[in-house]
Image (spheres, rainbow, N blue to C red):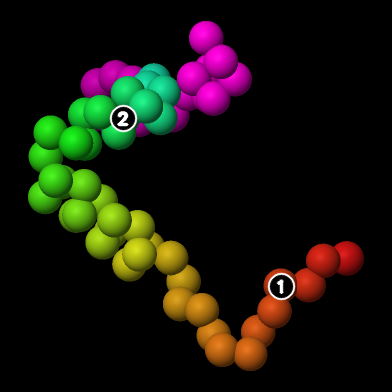
Amino acid sequence: MNKEQKKLIELRLTKCRLYLTEPELVSLLRHDPALWQEAIRRAQAARPPKQPGTKKLEI
């Protein structure tokens, strides 16, 4: 098992928690492209909008 496969993604459901690796999750999403698109749309909507001209400052 390589380092990337050791990273687990926690999915909190109502009655349980699931732990999947990224390749496992991608494999599941490949079976339903519409679900994949909906998840991307939700992620974009959840992100705060970027404001032009602002930069991230590192201190």
For disc 1, the marked residue is: 56
The residue mark sitting in front, 2 or 1, is: 2
For disc 2, the marked residue is: 25
Q: Could you say whether the residue bearing mark 1 is in a helix, strand or loop? A: loop
Q: Is residue 43 above or below residue 50?
A: above
Is residue 9 found inside the magenta-colored segment of the image? yes
The answer to whether the residue labelled 2 contacts the one labelled 1, judged by CB atoms less than 8 Å apart, is: no
Tell me the crowding category of disc 2: few under 14, some 14 to 19, or many 20 or more residues within 10 angstroms, Cα based.
few
For the point 35% across and 57% down, the residue is 43
Q: CA distance from mark 2 to mark 1?
A: 31 Å
> With 26 as the anchor, is 31 left or right in this view?
left
x then y, percent, for residue 26: 30, 33
Which stretch is magenta?
1-18
x then y, percent, for residue 29: 21, 36
For the point 12% across and 33% down, the residue is 31
Q: Amino acid at mark 1?
A: Lys
Q: Nearer the viewer, residue 53 or 5?
A: 5
Q: Which residue is the extreme one toward the top?
A: 1
